[in-house]
Image (cartoon, coloured by chain):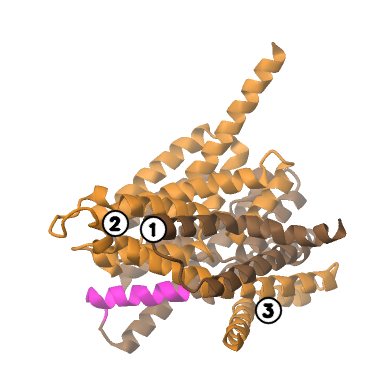
Amino acid sequence: MSSLLLHLWHVTLNTIFDVLPIVIIIFGFQGLVIRKPMPNMKKVVVGFIYVLLGLAFFLVGLEEALFPLGDLMAKQLTDPAFLHSGGKISDILRWQDYKWVYLFAAAIGFATTIAEPALIAVAIKAQDVSGGTISIWGLRIAVAIGVGIGISLGTYRIVTGTPLHYYIIAGYVLVMIQTIYAPRSIIALAYDSGGVTTSTVTVPLVTALGLGLASTIPGRSALIDGFGLIAFASLFPIMSVMGYAQLSRWRASRNNIQQDE
Amino acid sequence: MAMLQIFRPFINSFRDLLPIILVIGFFQLFILQQPVPHLEKILVGVLMVVIGLTLFIRGLEMGLFPLGESMAYAFARKGSVTWLLLFAFSLGFGTTIAEPALIAVSAKAAEVAASAGAIENTRAAMESYAFGLRLTVALSVGFAIVVGVLRIIRGWPIQNLIVVGYLGVVIMTMFAPKEIIGIAYDSGGVTTSTITVPLVTALGVGLASSIKGRNPMTDGFGLIAFASLTPMIFVMAYGMII
């Protein structure tokens, strides 16, 4: 228990240290440039302390419980002994043999995105600003589906060893085509959701999966092929969020037609 | 009833976490068919995550959102574009240079560069490479927030700028050393941290709602998008120069 408290203390200190530049910049500009007292100063400071403490608890909890387990599972699922179960060890592994890896990648990508605090923040803002047209859960689920698909495809890429940039450039072309047809109000939010998804929860778990895969597959280098999953996780939500907006617009227009009749 | 009100946010946070628990439980028990190790440790960890997420979201609405918005309003009232852009740059640069995920990625990138023979395989060379990379990414994020804020002020459509960015990424990909590409693409995603995102989003939305003729929905979002795009281009450029 005491080691846990010690860990919590260290992480809290680290979080404070990480946030220090932001605090200095904001209060520096507030004091030197704006030169007006901030409204509700006390409440903001308390809120900041909540954020710091919350983040520290969150990180320690993840490091104590979920990351070691996720790490272990990534290793077990990519272990040739597990992949060969039912077949002979001498068999050469084909890409189909990694089906549980793809499924795990999709499921863990989806699940970690739902718990991502930065995405919750953006979703709250988006619901506020859109006046409820975009719901918190609608956006979060759309982004999570995108991340799930992206990471799953990313693991397939590591298994087959195809160059990363082909996928990314093809993804860009798709994003541009979707941009032409998507409702204008969603475009900026969709682009944002790509960068938002990959922070505290998703990055460590996904990196473990990528490195686990790249280091067990013959001919792949962990250093070179292990990267790229985050890029997939930041690209696919753009498409899924625009898709979500297109779908809700289509449903709304269908309802309108039904009401008119 | 009052008790339920107090526990409500905790229940919500637990619900946010539930998918992870289900996925890990399912794969552990049914696919890998192994018992869950250190169950009590995991339960304590889950409890901490729930408490942490609840506090974070409470603090978000009390502190970070109002902070970002009040800064945006204050700058809009002041009417000085120069100061606003300087603030935007400092915010982007300052939050990125100390970002732990970026520190980890740049150390990895230095290993790749050393193993590919791009730099000497010594500790000093790798450290200076990693620091240079961090500086590059932080500069690129500062630049991105400046461009993003300018876009909000002027009301440029976001897709035009994104197309230019995508073209930049594609062109750089053709010329950048092969080893750096994966890291460059990933660096876009890792720069935006959990505290930066709510602040920057609130700043953008606040600016768009305080400037006449801007719509907070179409113009307010998009800062994060730039912050995840420019590092890819800058990191590939860094890989080419070094």
Q: Is residue B110 magenta?
A: yes
Residue B75 at x, y percent in the picture: 75, 62
Tag 3: amino acid: Ile
Residue A97 at x, y percent in the picture: 25, 51
Tag 1: amino acid: Leu
Which mark lies nearer to you, 3 or 1?
A: 1
Which residue lies under the disc numbered 3?
A24
The CA span between labels 2 and 1 is 9 Å
In the picture, measured across the screen, residue B156 lies left or right of residue A130, that is left
A247 or A24: nearer the viewer: A247
Q: What is the quadrant of the N terminus of chain B in the image?
A: bottom right
The image shows residue A172, relative to residue B175, as above or below, that is above
Tag 2: amino acid: Ile
Residue B139, numbered circle = none
On the same chain, marks 3 and 2? The answer is yes
The residue located at (42%, 60%) in the rendering is B28
Chain ID for orange: A
Provide the secondary structure element on which disc 1 rests: helix
Of the numbered discs 2 and 1, the one sitting upstream in the chain is: 2
Can the viewer see residue B236?
no
Of the numbered discs 3 and 2, the one sitting upstream in the chain is: 3
Q: Residues within 10 Å of mark 2 (few under 14, many from 20)?
A: many
Q: Is residue A227 magenta?
A: no
Residue A185 at x, y percent in the picture: 63, 39
Provide the secondary structure element on which disc 3 rests: helix
Q: Colour of chain B?
A: brown
The image shows residue A109, relative to residue A14, as above or below, that is above
Of the numbered discs 3 and 1, the one sitting upstream in the chain is: 3
Q: What is the quadrant of the C terminus of chain B in the image?
A: bottom left
Provide the secondary structure element on which disc 2 rests: helix
In the picture, measured across the screen, residue B74 lies left or right of residue A211, that is right
Q: Which residues are magenta?
A: B102-119
